[in-house]
Amino acid sequence: MPFPRALIFDMDGTLVDNMSYHKQSWIDLFAFHQLDLDYATFDKKYHKGSLVEIMKRIFPEIENEKELFRIGSYKEVLYRDLYRPHIQPIEGLHAFLEKQQTKGYPMGIATMGNQDNIDFIFNALELAPFFHSTTGGHQIKKGKPHPEIFLKAAKKLQVAPKDCLVFEDTKSGITAALAAGMEVVGISTMFDEKSLLELGCIAAVNDYTNLNLIEQTLATN
């Protein structure tokens, strides 16, 4: 059976180069709540999993998950306000998606972003026609690096995990995809290409303009 049978994409840092805006929105959230927490410490000790999982670490005194989600959702409002004037796709994205669509690949999204963030990116960049389904962090219990989100995305596409090729940019995302039994192409918005290969990616690219390398990966793995 040819590989792959479906493509699954992370969103932040993979379809758009927006991670610096997420970083600033976290910093702004800490300031809003007057927390003595710098970003480096947060990224090392708190920043993994779903939004609720992260909020539980930051606010251990709050047990109500709906309240934790509400607090965390304000961070996403800050992010969207910051990124809205700058939003653009990673170079070559639309041409790449169009080409894969003509080949009949079902394509899905597996992002830790919530539905508002998915809608924000999809509406601004007119991405909805390319994707069969989306899976967001609000739809799972355990966030990346746990494989749940990729397994759920594959189920929506009705394709076995081993037959899915993932496009990812972060260590937690790559770890999650590999744990789901999927191969990964790394997008070098967070790590250089050498580091992405060391993390287990079968290929690594700066953007989607290097179609030859990506096509070769699709054809030979």
Image (cartoon, rainbow, N blue to C red):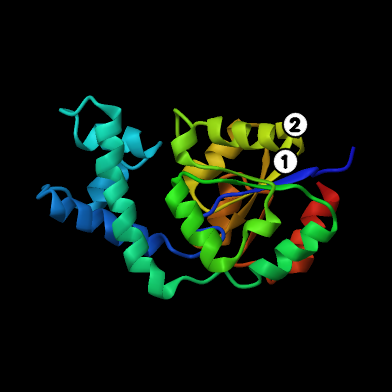
Relative to 68, say whether 41 is above or below: below
Q: Quadrant of residue 28?
A: bottom left
Q: Where does the N terminus fall, quadrant-wise?
A: top right
Image coords of residue 145 (percent x, y): 48, 36
Q: Which numbered circle lies on residue 160?
A: 2
Q: Amino acid at mark 1?
A: Cys
**Residue occupying image coordinates x 56% and y 60%:** 15
Q: Is residue 204 left or right of residue 213?
A: left
**Residue occupying image coordinates x 62% and y 31%:** 151
Image coords of residue 147 (percent x, y): 55, 32
Image coords of residue 195 (percent x, y): 53, 54
Image coords of residue 213 (percent x, y): 75, 63
Q: Quadrant of residue 72?
A: top left
Q: Nearer the viewer, residue 116 or 163?
A: 116
Contact? badges 1 and 2 (CB < 8 Å):
yes
Distance from the alpha carbon under mark 1 to that under mark 2 = 7 Å
Helix, strand or loop status at disc 2: loop
Relative to 111, say whether 13 is above or below: below
**Residue occupying image coordinates x 26% and y 46%:** 42
Q: Which residue is mark 1?
A: 164
